Amino acid sequence: MKICAWRESDIQDIKSIGISKEDLIIIDENISHMALFQPDMAHKAQLVLSEIGIRKAPELNPDKITSLSELIQFYRENVGKDASIEEIKMWRKDIVSGVKPSFIAINFSNKNNLSIDMDLSL
Amino acid sequence: MNINKDSLYSMWVRLGVNFPSFEPLIEEPMLEDLIAKTSLIGRYEPRLIEAMSGWIQKHGDLLNSSLMHKCIDYGDSAVIGLISDLLDSKESTKFKSIQKYCKPKEKAEMLFFSAESSSVMKAQAIENATELNDKWNLYYVSLRIKTDAVYNRIEILKKNPNLARRALFGSEMRTEILNYLLSNKASFPSEIAKALGYRYHRVLEDIHNLLRDGALVQKSFNKKKEIRLSPLFDDYLRSIPF
């Protein structure tokens, strides 16, 4: 339950209690079941598991990014730092107005590649 | 400022929050000071902020807004502003006066630092943001107002005589002067004003009135007027009816 309805105070609990192998089996069963009815929620639970170091983080392809949380994670992997809340608010605004998260991801991925190329040319 | 998080839990236990793993502090803490410190450390410990919110929601009438203004300076003023804005209480006028002294964050932040490293939480906090989040520039996934973890009024007043006197005489400067004299036996107006953070002339005015009405007595001490509670009034103040 905690993994699906992930709250700030749960982080402390998970750190102090930990997750056993048996817990993980139950969590996986629940996530598989949830994926049938609420795929977004199941996907979010997978991201939470990767954030707390239980699972390897999924490789994110900018073309296939569909949610704000994936976008934030992709930014971290691609740019090498955490996106600020201001940036996230801006992306959220864009997404609400119809811009696809994948478009934003491709955009800053290209920018990042461009700056790396520029570094090389120096 | 060096603040120990365990001592904050113990202070809240003393004030009537149910944190079963912590013992109550021996001395009664000053509520406003505790709120200021919790607004800082609670950003690392969500349960402290949730308990504090529940306490204020339930017993906000015991909060002294003048003392709170002074303590906001060393607390996290945006956190105090957000919490007082969130609560739905009949003390809304008092909370509004507190909010006037609180400043929102210049740049948007997560309320709880543990969420800083979580893209899932950041996304959720922004997706579900309310007007209050935008007003104070503080975002969170979940902030529960834990009133169920806070004991009822009588239980709290029985264990905290300073709060009991606020309940009886009002959460005002005069009550704080009496509380100060009860714990310090004797003092000088300037010393009281400094300790409580009130303006000297306001403290002096109240002391004059209390002397006039026989609650206080004074004697000259090194050319200064030392004041203390009159013995009968001292006894009266210590007999809390709870």
Image (cartoon, rainbow, N blue to C red):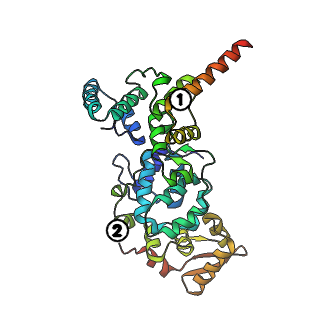
Q: Nearer the viewer, residue B18 or B80?
A: B80
Quadrant where the C terminus of chain B sits is: bottom left
Would you call the spot at circle 2 few (<14 residues within 10 Å), some (14-19), or many (20 or more)? Answer: few
Tell me what residue is drawn at x 46 percent, y 72 percent: B165
User: In percent of the image, x 71 and y 73: which residue is there?
Assistant: B222
Say whether residue B25 is visible: no
Residue B91 horizontal/vertical position (percent): 47, 69
For residue A76, the mark is none
Amino acid type, mark 2: Ile
Q: Residue furthest right?
A: A122
Chain of the residue under the numbered disc 1 shown in the image: A
Q: Position of residue B13 (x, y in %)?
A: 39, 54
Q: Which mark is residue A103?
A: 1
Question: Which residue is at the far bottom?
Answer: B213
- Which mark is nearer the camera, 2 or 1? 1
- Contact, CB < 8 Å: mark 2 with mark 1? no
Left or right of B172 in this view: B60:
left
User: For the residue carrying disc 1, how many other residues have a C-alpha within 10 Å: few (<14), some (14-19), or many (20+)?
Assistant: some
Label 1 sits on a secondary structure element that is helix
Q: Amino acid at mark 1?
A: Phe
Judging from the image, what secondary structure is the residue with disc 2 in?
helix
Residue B154 marker:
2
| In front of the other: B40 or B98 | B98
Vertical side of B190 occupied by B87: above or below: above
Q: From what the image shows, is residue A35 above or below residue B211?
A: above
Q: How many marks?
A: 2
